[in-house]
Image (spheres, rainbow, N blue to C red):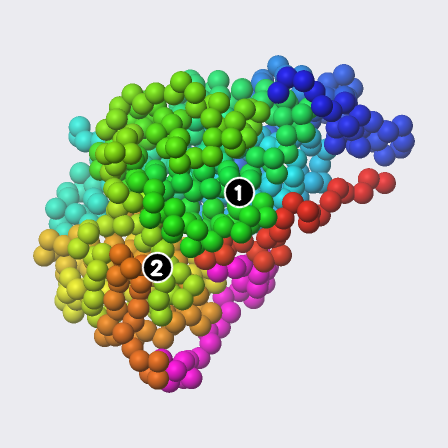
Amino acid sequence: MSNKSLKPEDLRSARWFAPDDLRSFGHRSRMMQLGYSEEDFRDKPIIGVLNTWSELNTCHSHFPERVQDVKRGVSQAGGFAVEMPTLSVDETFTKPTSMLYRNLLAMETEEMIRSHPLDGVVLMGGCDKTTPGLIMGALSAGVPMIYLPAGPMLRGNYAGKILGSGSDAWKYWDERRAGNISDEEWVGVQGGIARSAGHCMTMGTASTMTAIADAMGLCLTGVSSIPAVDANHQRMSAECGRQIVDMVWNNCTPDKIVTEAAVRNASIVAMATGCSTNAVVHLIAIARRAGINLSLDDLDVLGRNTPLIANVRPSGKDYLMEDFYYAGGLKALMSQLSERLDLSAMTVNGKTLGQNLEGTEVYNDDVIRPLSNPVYHEGSLAVLKGNLCPDGAVIKPAACDPKFYVHEGPAMVFDSYPEMKAAVDDENLDVTPDTVMVLRNAGPQGGPGFPEWGMLPIPKALIKQGYRDMLRISDARMSGTSYGACVLHVAPESFVGGPLSLLQNGDIVRLDLPNRSLDMLISEEELEKRKANKVAPEPKFERGYGVMFSRHVTQADQGCDFDFLQTDYGRTAGEPDIF
């Protein structure tokens, strides 16, 4: 995109700075107060660098340096960059869950863009909820945008063993509870599992969502695979700065990129990577911000027909994101899928996806498998329906023991996480390998905020017998680094009266994965009796953002966006008045 389709007077920022009136005088004088001359910003695209860094966001600890790389690129291309700090929604420390604040980040992003003289934006994210939050807000704002992914951290390492963030934490914790890990080993794993800047290096939610942004055309194609501390990441950041200036001059707005074809491409790529179950919620929310009615059923069809070809933990067995990058990264994976993708979809560099994939090679076909030799014959996720989840639930078949694909057993029901946590540590708990553990009141409203409680710990009584998996059901989410026979996102959730709220201890639950069904084997008459006796729970919030969240958040199958924010490109808030 070298030819400019806009003139300086057409820039959005010109509304703030160009007129010869008192208000614009004030804008220009305040820019001079910051030490700039008019030559620095007049008649140039003003680029907002939206940075989700904080000192508690470990995934983004390198972002202060990357901002300078972006600014360098913007300046090289003749633009003017301003850093705009945004809400830093980190997965590690934000409680009760970062998902509670994804929509707040989206709202802040949208309003920050709309209310300031920004012609285009570079979105800096990576940790789980920052990618969808930034993209959702920028889609609704409608100015040219490019996504800069934080990149995965380096492989973990302890005592000569390669560690995967999240996934190995769960594994070693079970061994610790079984008495198989010493204090010294536990501390060693703790110090070796996360050892550089960057997000989780498994194919967890962070790597999943940056890959989705990449496959959707919102990144420079393939850059989501670059490790955070690789020098290529610095060069990529500068290129994002140069590219966004070009996008502004050519009015390359997000509606020209995030099309039905782009969303479908991103969904296929997600399935082929062994994506996090959280991808379902975020993909639906992003698509609906773009006016595309993506549904769980659409994703299930793609899941049935897309082989898993990224041999990366937790769905893959052997490798991590650093290995994935060396094997050719996301570009190589997309080249393997080229016959299934719409290669005419436009990307941020003004070229089609097909043009960007030309000449791409796979350097290790055990890490990035050919379609003829997949890790798993179907994609990462499956969608279930039944009388326990009439609006849907999700499971990750490739990451659980196949013996649970068809399973029937008695329910052990917990109404809160503390209740469940106390029970699983009871070595005398009356539980068998056939038991179906159920946690409810953990959905969008019940959690509150849809926390990652869905990978319920295996009861200590079973761990000591050598069991490491069992069927678990919840209206919660689980970490993208998790694994096991976990059915998640049960909708409608228990807290709002979904059928899960009617389940009782000892009721028989049946999962039939091949037929995509999940049911409690109870008569309709009995369910009606239980429904008549049910008492509605007390609201979780009495003030503030929590009240807004509980009144307006949609259910898991609808993306958990706020109902008043799901819109299309034709229904935006418009430009602010400048008087």
40 vs 313, nearest the viewer: 313
Seen at 14% across and 54% down, the residue is 467
428 vs 387, nearest the viewer: 387
- What number is the disc on residue 384? 2
Mark 1 surroundings within 10 Å by alpha-carbon count, few (fewer than 14), some (14 through 19), many (20 or more): some
Q: Which span is picked out in magenta? A: 527-555
Seen at 77% across and 28% down, the residue is 10
Q: Amino acid at mark 1?
A: Glu
Query: How many angstroms separate mark 1 from mark 2 (CA)?
Result: 24 Å
434 vs 379, nearest the viewer: 379
Q: Position of residue 72 (x, y in %)?
A: 58, 17
Asked if residue 360 lies left or right of residue 39, the reply is left
Q: Position of residue 479 (x, y in %)?
A: 35, 48
Asked if residue 474 lies left or right of residue 85, the reply is left
Q: Is residue 77 above or below residue 497?
A: above
Q: Amino acid at mark 2?
A: Leu
Residue, far left: 465
Q: Position of residue 255 (x, y in %)?
A: 61, 38
Asked if residue 178 lies left or right of residue 199, the reply is left
Asked if residue 233 lies left or right of residue 408, the reply is right
Label 1 sits on a secondary structure element that is: helix
Residue, far right: 21
Q: Is residue 6 magenta?
A: no
Seen at 9% across and 57% down, the residue is 465
